[in-house]
Amino acid sequence: MNGADAKPFGLSTLRATAAALTLALLGACAAAPQQAALDPKNGDGLGGTGISSGGIKTAQVNTRGDGIGGTGIGTGIVGTITGFGSIIVNGLELEFNTSTAVVSDGRPASLQDLRIGQVVQGIARTREGKLTLDTLDIQHAVTGPISAIDQATQTMTVLGQRVRLNLGGDKAAADAFKTLQAGDVVSVSGQRLADGTIIATRVDQKHDDGRVIVRGNVGALTATSVRVGELDVALSPDTTVSAPKAGGRVVISGRMINGQFAPDVINGGDMLPFGATVADVSLEAYAPANAGGSGPLNVHGVTITGAALPPGTVTNDRIIVTGKIDGPDKIAAAAIAKVRTLVTVLQAQGSARPAAVRPDTPRFERVNPPQRPERPQSVTPPVIERPVIERPTA
């Protein structure tokens, strides 16, 4: 979200101050159910790698053409921003430059719009031994007015989508959340549990410009409507750019008119929408309902083969799947890691946003101004001795 979109959270000074300073960075709500609080000694928190038992470490890029980021191979990435310097997603250090194309929900954006806790989708390639982003899309799970909110359970409903926060002991974030109320318009970043609930990793309040969006899996599909969460949207040739598929992904944008959602664009797509030039993949998700059971592993419509879940993984544990695309919505996994990523700005290491990209033009050496000549030291005039004059004697 652009900084210009932010607004005070209420009329009182206390509410405006608390929300403006902290709610825009509600990163502390990223922990999945059944996950313990972070232990900074284990590398958790911002700028760390989200390491847990059996977790993922910052990847080392190779140039042999195998594994993540092989030479000339595109790597598709879906995950949460957990740090900067380079952009840290799924433990990968992603470089960027002036040619990196950035969008936010399909609209032009810039690297300065990136924030901790946002869920992004990108394509990176190896350049000079480093994974460098070609494209990066900031993808909000839902943007719209809050229809219901429960401060005690830290839950809310936005455009028919259930949203859960887990603010832990982050008092500043919890106080900021208390300033929200029904009718406020928010953008929610996060991944979905098996039942469709969004676990928020970031919440931003924005100006109500009437534009809203919902992104998720198709829950029910008929010839005339599609359902995402608890939101039913009518299908029309005038609004449908790409027809949704049963069990597939769909992005629906529109406007609120007299309190009702009116779709402008409905765009269905594949679960792995990276194109033919992408072979490697790093995918963050929550473990499905059959975690630990028999049968093929299916994560939000993506079939995973080649690697099993780590021992002890249960439904709704946060996982990262690393492997190669093996067909439409299929991944041949090299590894599956269980991670915990309780993101909180209070544990941020370094900047909370990426540094500005310098232009490719050469920089001129700074020329120091000439030194001012030293002022001469004051000189004590010489003492002139008077000659001794002898007077004549009588």
Image (cartoon, rainbow, N blue to C red):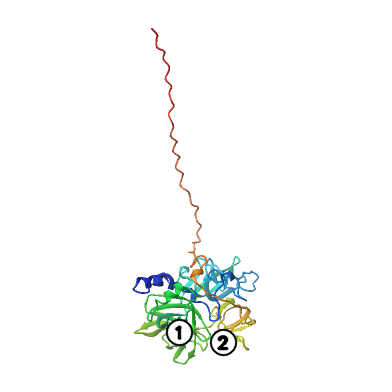
Placement of the C terminus among the 4 image quadrants: top left
Q: How many numbered marks does the figure carry?
A: 2
Residue 98, percent across and down?
Answer: 50, 66
Left or right of 281 on screen, residue 147:
left
Pointer 1 residue: 161
Within-10-Å neighbours for mark 1: few <14, some 14–19, many 20+:
many
Local SS, label 1: strand
Furthest toward the top, the residue is 394
The relative height of residue 384 versus residue 33 in the rendered view (above or below) is above
- The first of marks 2 and 1 along the sequence is 1
Examine the image and state in which quarter residue 278 appears: bottom right
Examine the image and state in which quarter residue 382 appears: top left
Residue 210, percent across and down?
Answer: 37, 79
Distance between mark 2 and mark 1 Cα atoms: 19 Å
Left or right of 115 on screen, residue 281:
right
Placement of the N terminus among the 4 image quadrants: bottom left
Is 185 or 302 nearer to us in this picture?
Answer: 185
Q: Look at label 2 and name its amino acid.
A: Ala
Residue 33, percent across and down?
Answer: 53, 81
Local SS, label 2: loop
Residue 123, percent across and down?
Answer: 54, 73
Q: Look at label 1 and name its amino acid.
A: Gln
Within-10-Å neighbours for mark 2: few <14, some 14–19, many 20+:
some
Pointer 2 residue: 289
Q: Are marks 2 and 1 in contact (CB under 8 Å)?
A: no
